Image: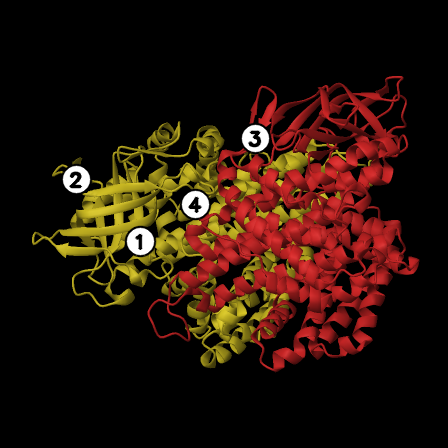
Chain colours: A yellow, B red
Amino acid sequence: MRSFVAPLGEIRFILRELLDVDRELSGLPAYRGLGADTCEQVIGAAARYAEDVVAPLNARGDREGCVLEAGEVRTPHGYAAAYRAFVEQGWPALACRAEDGGQALPSLLNNVLYEFLNATCPAWSMYPALAHGAYHTLRHYGSEALRRLYLPKLVSGEWTATMCLTEPQSGSDLGTVRCRAEAAGDGTWRLGGAKLFISGGDHDLAENIVHLVLARLPGAPAGSRGVSLFVVPKFIPDAAGRPGVRNAVSVTGIEHKMGICGSATCAMQFDGAVGWLVGAPHCGLSNAFVMMNAARLGVGVQAVGIAEAASQAAIAYARQRRQGRAANIATEAAPIIAHAEVRRMLLTQKAWVEGGRMLAYWLGLQLDVEAHHEDPHARQRAEDLVALLTPVAKAFLTDNASACANLAIQVHGGYGYMVETGVEQLVRDARIMQIYEGSNGIQAIDLLGRKVIADDGRRLRVFLDLIAAWLASPGGQTAPAPMRQRLGSLAADVEVLSRVLSARAASDPHLVGAVATDYLRIIGHLAFAYLFARSAATCAARAVAGDPFFQARHVVAAFYFNRLLPEADACLAAIRACDGDFAVRDDAILFS
Amino acid sequence: MRSFVAPLGEIRFILRELLDVDRELSGLPAYRGLGADTCEQVIGAAARYAEDVVAPLNARGDREGCVLEAGEVRTPHGYAAAYRAFVEQGWPALACRAEDGGQALPSLLNNVLYEFLNATCPAWSMYPALAHGAYHTLRHYGSEALRRLYLPKLVSGEWTATMCLTEPQSGSDLGTVRCRAEAAGDGTWRLGGAKLFISGGDHDLAENIVHLVLARLPGAPAGSRGVSLFVVPKFIPDAAGRPGVRNAVSVTGIEHKMGICGSATCAMQFDGAVGWLVGAPHCGLSNAFVMMNAARLGVGVQAVGIAEAASQAAIAYARQRRQGRAANIATEAAPIIAHAEVRRMLLTQKAWVEGGRMLAYWLGLQLDVEAHHEDPHARQRAEDLVALLTPVAKAFLTDNASACANLAIQVHGGYGYMVETGVEQLVRDARIMQIYEGSNGIQAIDLLGRKVIADDGRRLRVFLDLIAAWLASPGGQTAPAPMRQRLGSLAADVEVLSRVLSARAASDPHLVGAVATDYLRIIGHLAFAYLFARSAATCAARAVAGDPFFQARHVVAAFYFNRLLPEADACLAAIRACDGDFAVRDDAILFS
């Protein structure tokens, strides 16, 4: 069975050296005085919690799954106890505001925490994870009364939350939601209808569950501009804020899934459940996007965690398994880590993990800048980068994570296909990340259609300017010349391509859908090329001086540039060659 | 739940028009008089058998799995009855020689049969599939007595077979096999030792199981030149050829796997089991390669079947599921097949399936030519193509099949992650195909190291000459010019690349392992580009004339060239950029 050790050295490198959080965070009033040392203490404690408490839940929870009995969900053995420890240690409060009872630490640190939780048990991690989006949504849009009642409970972790968005007929297009809400006359609402695929819709970890529910008011406009957001607690809080009367929301079934079997995915029924409106009527969808955007970046972080776990499992096995004669080892059976083909797989994983981690942390830092910087221009710039790259982090990192998990199986050979080895669970658990919180195709269309074309390239310009400025900076000059060149030429290609696509999209309504996925892969590579070039620049002097840690970083960066980045050119060629013919043909003929 | 309909129209096109089997087969004395009509009758019957008898086994067998009770394996409900029908209908005999009781039909047809079986239930298909390799091995290397005894039983399907090769310490490198065989003095041998991951090692489908076992004689040389092959029946046949005394071979456990759960993967123990030597002592490994090569091409066929099933499931769902407004449909919620991003996924599947089918059938035809052509040069040419492209068919087609299965999930969105939908099983079942019968990394090393470099490019030359000759032929001239150009330039790139790699490999022992996987993808694309160009040439006139079937083939071919083939350039770039640094670094530093 695999075991996980948090990669503290690599994280320390990214935080201290690559991102220079000491300087970056101390530039934000909210975190003045907070340095890398404090960050590392928190990260060390998070690592111990994940390794000791969460990791043991993973394989067993996969076997046991959840059970629905008499309308209540029972989670796998150990889940509830681990959650109690999570609450006792204060982890839910980590990045919440002090005025809500939070610890007011950077959301960057929360990302690191969730990376570890997902490296050790993605299914369990779903239960606490959803509270963060609900916290931010209620904090932004909830009334004073709702905030006073719910925020402290979410911050302490006493209560968890769900996002009740999807319905059987309403998935990618939430404008078709049918759940209804009628005014009760006392300021509350009565909700009716069915929701599907609700993660943590019920469980036995916490005393109450706060459902955030999309529904329509009577006479609401059709489509996405007629959807409102409600808070519907499992137990209606009494005057003292304690869970009171059971609300009319019930679980009608739990799904039997490919993976994350310990996470209860619920079909929910609302039968006149009491709810409170969050934000203005009919603005539910855009308000819910506060949750969704946080969740999307969160999925990117999950992907880094599971990819790291896959990488560690593969390396450990490749060290121990002996098979075949290696080119430079005399004995009959060498550890397979000596074989170049195995190293290719291990380094592919390493590069996806390191690139993903750099991107997720860098974006996490931008989130903190966006929320706390004194300079409105700096805030705007950070907001632009987050908006542009959130779909990239969600889709690029999860596609890569599934590739990493599959490589873990491949390195294990036949043993990897056996349940006991534990790596096939990584593939099954990782697979949902490419689907939920907006499938990766939806992310790609969001990126190209909304974030680039509809924005007239403004946000993309911010990113390209950042890259150009770095390349011209003293730091950029220390990056190896081939990497600098490659990064610069890819940025130039992206600029031209984006302009061409914007022009073509005006007359071809199918174009965005036809090329978006390839476009997202290209932007993902542009971000990775930028970050790996920065990493190589940061490492250069010490790698030359012979420090093994920095040499390793350099080899990974070079491997990324040499072996993985060429995919971007294939995607460019595919987009250029795309004639759109396939999009307009009669499907009865094409797919007969 | 998904249902499967054999794609008889596309198969008919490949057999009749693309491969012109009427002419090709009638050129072989063994099949004189056999035309496409007969082939299609057989294929039609195979389709009905798979659709009606095998398809219902798939989901249930996945849930039930196999059970080991008192040393005997019980297969899932319905498996044994389906196998009885398989035997009664004479399917095991399809491509076996008439003198052994076979139907003497082309192995090409056997491929089509197994494509259907794997499209409907890969786990069940494992039980009959392994008999074919055993049949060929015994026919080539077995003594007269062994052949008289075993071949009719394998041909009728009364008995099944296994390949007992792998041991716990001996997977990719079978030269490290430890099982022992000692002479009993009466011409038989006594085998001792343990085998692992033995598909169909025991089951309740047939009255006897013929194990083909690799073991070492006393004093045998170390390594791969000291391994011998034995036949070890579960029940020792009596004088009349009926299963007699139980042999000392037992199942010590069955594996709990990610997929193909209905296929019993057994740990076996030989405790002085009675065996008979097959072929000369110490030549077991090369003799077993007769089985393995047949099995490797067979895995490519499996991959086509499961990819076709994935494609059909995705298309059916995309027609029925309504979500989102489409560019050219006025209603609120269009069938998702109208979205270009969904079509991109569906056409990617279509292209992988059609390309894979063309390659598998074309190679199947080459096998028949190799076995039956009167002209030794034609036989040699076919043998060269089969040897070169068998690892490609195994690895390229199985990697693509896993991609197709994953796309089926992606098209289904959240529903695809639910067990009931049936497509996540495709991913789990397909995953083993990239591993067994030699992992895809092993295939890549076999291709580049043995089939190309060690062969000094001779077989590759045969393939490149074939492409050049076709391009210069009247048929080649009718292919669209961009496809002809692209095929020609890729062939030229492959020629130069192969020469460069041969030269570099002489001084760099890590090179083959470092680049083999990328190289195999390139050769796979070269084969697909050749076959899709031929397909487009064959379709051209009728596509222009407006025949929908041929228009669809043209769109798929164009999609392949425009959108998927660019991967070959990325692989070329990756190989050119590969500096090998990663292969020689101290692993303790690199993977710390």
Question: Which residue in the protein does label 3 denote?
Answer: A420
Query: Which amino acid type is shown beneath numbered disc 1?
Result: Leu
Q: Residues within 10 Å of mark 1 (few under 14, many from 20)?
A: many
Same chain check for tags 4 and 3:
no
- For the C terminus of chain B, which image quadrant? top right
Quadrant of the image occupied by residue A266: top left
Measure the C-alpha gap from mark 4 to mark 3: 24 Å
Mark 2 and mark 4, same subunit?
no
Q: Is residue B177 left or right of residue A448?
A: right
Residue A461 falls left or right of residue A490: left
Verify CB contact (< 8 Å) between mark 1 and mark 4. Answer: no
Q: Which tag, 3 or 2, sits closer to the chain's start? A: 2
> CB of mark 1 within 8 Å of CB of mark 3?
no
In the displayed structure, does residue B413 sit left or right of residue B532? left
| Element type where label 4 sits in the image | helix
Q: Dot 2 corresponds to which residue? A: A237
Tell me where residue B363 appears, x and y as whole percent: 76, 57
Which is in the foreground here, disc 4 or disc 3? 4
